[in-house]
Image (cartoon, grey):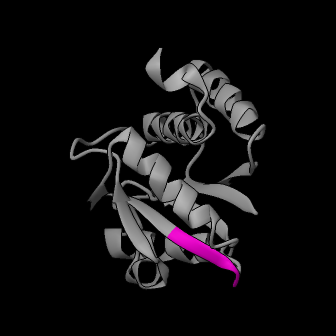
């Protein structure tokens, strides 16, 4: 089983890259995990709908048939850390590859929403996409430590 995170745009801040890579390494202790960066196509010549369509097509290129797709969106279902760990544990038992996606500035295209299995919210607040990536990988790592009774969650 594998888990991947698909994100739109690059993480540019070195401090964030270091932290994300640290959690990437930690998560890989528990499960094969990777991050795929999709190019962002911001341009004054492309309107919001066209941008979501282009980004959506690029996201869908990385979704395989045996994967379950979850979209990170402020309007999705909220979890606390313990419930998110239970959610991950239940999904692992399906023995399917899990893919999470963080969209671009305007969210996801309708095609991506149709392909998704569930929408999850990290918060009702809006975060930069770079920070959202860090928050997601930290929470995924935290979920695995909770599942495996590691004390990280209570530090």
Magenta stretch: dominant SS? strand
Percent across and percent down for residue 44 are 38, 59
Does residue 15 lie above or below 46 as drawn?
A: above
Q: Quadrant of residue 49?
A: bottom left
Asked if residue 146 is positioned above or below residue 34 in the image, the reply reads above
Q: Is residue 40 magenta?
A: no
Residue 41 visible in the shown view: no
Instruction: Tell me where residue 118 appears, x and y as whole percent.
Output: 41, 72
Q: Can you give x and y, in whole percent of width and height, for residue 140 in the image?
A: 55, 42
Q: Nearer the viewer, residue 120 or 108?
A: 120
Residue stretch rendered in magenta on the structure: 65-69
Q: Give above or below for 96 relative to 99.
A: below
- Answer with the quarter of the image where residue 15 lies: top right
The residue lying furthest to the front in this view is: 149
Residue at (68% x, 54% y) in the render = 36
Verify whether residue 66 appears in magenta. yes
Q: Residue at x 66, y 57 (%)?
A: 4
Left or right side of 127 for 141: right
Q: Is residue 118 among the parts visible in the rendering?
A: yes
């Amino acid at each position: 089983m594998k888990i991947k995170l698909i994100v739109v745009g690059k993480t540019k801040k070195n401090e964030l890259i270091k932290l994300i890579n640290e959690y990437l390494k930690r998560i890989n202790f528990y499960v094969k995990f990777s991050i795929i960066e999709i190019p962002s196509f911001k341009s004054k010549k492309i309107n919001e709908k066209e941008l979501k369509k282009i980004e959506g097509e690029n996201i869908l290129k990385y979704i395989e048939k045996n994967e379950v797709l979850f979209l990170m969106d402020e309007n999705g279902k909220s979890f606390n850390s313990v419930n998110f760990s239970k959610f991950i544990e239940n999904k692992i038992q399906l023995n399917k590859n899990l893919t999470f996606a963080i969209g671009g500035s305007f969210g996801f295209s309708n095609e991506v929403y149709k392909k998704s299995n569930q929408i999850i919210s990290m918060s009702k607040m809006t975060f930069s996409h770079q920070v959202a990536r860090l928050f997601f990988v930290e929470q995924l790592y935290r979920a695995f430590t909770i599942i495996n009774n590691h004390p990280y969650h209570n530090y």
